């Protein structure tokens, strides 16, 4: 990985602001992070602003690094654009004060740990008093997954989640509360 960037440090009697433009990419030139950041050190809690994009990301590795092991695994390749601000002196404080917005678009991926088509076919069979399908793949492959999000005080909310599979279009909305750091709760509503 290579890192290119420049930073401007504005200081008078003491260090007050660090700002810069950063770009990093993998050696194969396929994945890239671009960000404009500013860290304001004028107050007791540093304030951080960032605007940028992650391009050609592989979600499986990124999410595993961020969340650790989970029952649901999301794979796919895509892009993420974001604008965020936060302030704090610690990880939990930074999460609690996280605000901003962004957009995610993934293609040719899968959601492992949930077979949405199996659930639809099972519901259809039960309504029609037929036996349910014999086996689930426990995976939902998709051709496209898109969502925009808002962050308010550490709570991520979404109102336009869209998952497209060869046989199903699923829409959803919900929220993810990452505060406090040790108790993450999530709730999503799906429309098939």
Image (cartoon, helix red, strand yellow):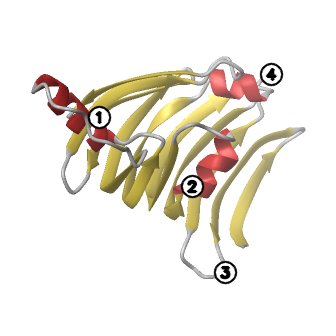
Percent x, y for residue 139? Answer: 41, 48
Q: Secondary structure at mark 1?
A: helix
Q: Residue furthest bottom?
A: 28
The residue at which mark 3 appears reads as: 27
Percent x, y for residue 8? Answer: 73, 56
C-alpha gap between disc 1 and disc 3: 42 Å
- Checking the image for residue 68, the label placed there is none
- Front one among 69 and 101: 69
The residue at which mark 2 appears reads as: 60
Which of the 4 image quarters holds residue 50?
top right
C-alpha gap between disc 1 and disc 4: 51 Å
Percent x, y for residue 43? Answer: 76, 24
Q: Earlier in the sequence, mark 1 or mark 3?
A: 3
Give above or below for 51 relative to 114: below
Residue in view at x 41 percent, y 58 percent: 109
- Checking the image for residue 44, the label placed there is 4
C-alpha gap between disc 2 and disc 4: 37 Å
- Checking the image for residue 119, the label placed there is 1
- Left or right: residue 74 versus residue 118 is right
- Front one among 145 and 117: 117
Total numbered circles: 4
Residue in view at x 9 percent, y 27 percent: 128
Mark 4 residue crowding within 10 angstroms, few (<14) / some (14–19) / many (20+): few
C-alpha gap between disc 2 and disc 1: 24 Å
Q: Nearer the viewer, mark 1 or mark 4?
A: 1
Q: Nearer the viewer, mark 1 or mark 3?
A: 1
Residue in view at x 69 percent, y 41 percent: 68
Asked if the residue under mark 1 is in contact with the one under mark 2, i.e. CB atoms within 8 Å, the reply is: no
């Amino acid at each position: 990985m290579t890192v290119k960037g420049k930073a401007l440090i504005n200081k008078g009697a003491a260090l007050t602001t660090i700002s810069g433009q950063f770009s990093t990419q993998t050696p194969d030139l396929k994945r890239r992070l671009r960000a404009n950041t500013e860290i304001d050190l004028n107050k007791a809690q540093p304030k951080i602003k960032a605007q940028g994009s992650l391009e050609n990301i592989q979600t499986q590795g990124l999410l595993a690094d961020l969340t650790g092991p989970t029952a649901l695994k999301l794979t796919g390749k895509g892009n993420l654009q974001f604008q965020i601000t936060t302030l704090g002196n610690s990880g939990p404080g930074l999460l609690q004060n996280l605000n901003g917005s962004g957009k995610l678009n993934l293609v040719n991926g899968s959601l492992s740990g949930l077979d949405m088509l199996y659930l639809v076919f099972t519901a259809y069979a039960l309504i029609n008093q037929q036996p349910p399908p014999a086996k689930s793949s426990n995976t939902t492959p998709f051709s496209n997954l898109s969502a925009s999000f808002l962050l308010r005080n550490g709570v991520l909310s979404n109102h336009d989640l869209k998952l497209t599979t060869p046989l199903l279009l699923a829409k959803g909305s919900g929220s993810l509360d990452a505060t406090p750091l040790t108790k993450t709760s999530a709730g999503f509503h799906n429309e098939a």
